[in-house]
Image (cartoon, rainbow, N blue to C red):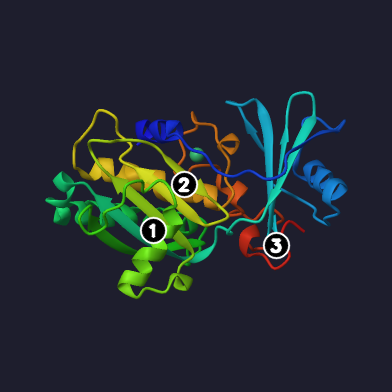
Amino acid sequence: MRLIKLLTMLVLCSFLLNTCEKGDSNSLFPPNQQSMAQIFNDRYGLKIQRVPVIYNEFTDQYVSTVYIDGSLYRAYMDQNAEVNFKITQPLFPKGETRVLCILRLSDSLFMQKDLVQEYWENAQAGINALHQNFVLGYGQSEPIVSFKTDNYYLSHEDFPIQNPNENTMGHFQDFARQTNLDLEEYDIFLWMELDLEQPGGGWADWKAQLAYVNWIYENDLTINQENFDGLAYAAYQHEIGHVWGWEHDWTDPFLNIDFITIPSLFGWIDIDGDGFVEILDPFPYQ
Ligand SMILES: [Zn+2]
């Protein structure tokens, strides 16, 4: 699993960034949950008390995130106490998340469609189990995040497009028209372009709530559960992580953890001690 994580960290990935500002500094170093909250308050006029603060050994910086009132605020502090701020309005990582997944299979894979379906749906169940087990560890029964995915397995003949990588949202709209699907019923659009002959990486567009994953294994054409678990990790952790606002800088790739990043950065931990994890807290980080 660790190898898969390292590989998926290397998956080529681009996504849209918003503002990035430099220049603020703070004498309180290293930062803690309260001092970092104060940094957000000073910068954005928030009224929060405690925020998660993670030291990332890989990038040698402190990372802090705040999901509040529809916005995701991030602060990255380097060893000189210099802070980079970012703010975007991504989908929040919580609740039942409805995913429309199109898997476009090359001919050789389409001939094994039943096997592909079995491995893919097992892998998706594994992702939901991970979220379920995470809250069980805190004595809760309801997962913070659950995915309800509708999968469509298409051959190139079913969906003959030249560049699935381009105008991907348009392809979802075409597909919805052909099949009388209502795109409004979905939160996330996931395109799995599985062609063993043309492996590649993935990308996400958080504004469109769109994630795209190729066959990510350059030299491995094996159709097995492990490879599909890796594809699900690339899709539901890495790329959908980007749809939630996750950035590569949040993650130390040498930490062996179940999720793409430390859960508190997604608001999945009760930081302020009021009994609610922050992403579900009516008064988050307060
Ligand atoms: Zn990425």
Measuring 43% from the left and 59% from the top, which residue is drawn there?
170
For marks 3 and 2, give the CA distance: 31 Å
Of residue 231 and residue 81, the one placed in the foreground of this image is 231
- Can residue 254 be seen here? The reply is yes
For marks 1 and 2, give the CA distance: 18 Å
Which of discs 1 and 2 lies nearer the camera? The answer is: 1
Dot 1 or dot 2: first in sequence order is 1
The residue beneath circle 2 is: 239
The residue beneath circle 1 is: 171
At label 2, which amino acid type do we have? Glu
215, above or below 134, in the image: above
33 to the left or right of 255: right
Which of discs 3 and 2 lies nearer the camera? The answer is: 2
Measuring 29% from the left and 30% from the top, which residue is drawn there?
218
Ligand 1 closer than 8 Å to label 2 CB: yes
The residue beneath circle 3 is: 274
Measuring 30% from the left and 62% from the top, which residue is drawn there?
151
211 to the left or right of 24: left
Residue 157 at what x, y percent from top left?
Answer: 20, 55
At label 3, which amino acid type do we have? Asp
| Element on which disc 3 rests | loop
Ligand 1 closer than 8 Å to label 1 CB: no
13, above or below 158, in the image: above
67, above or below 52, in the image: below
- Can residue 148 be seen here? The reply is no
Which of discs 3 and 1 lies nearer the camera? The answer is: 1
**In the rendered view of the protein, which quadrant contains the N terminus?**
top left
Disc 3 crowd rating (10 Å Cα; few below 14, some 14-19, many 20+) is few
Q: Which mark is residue 44?
A: none
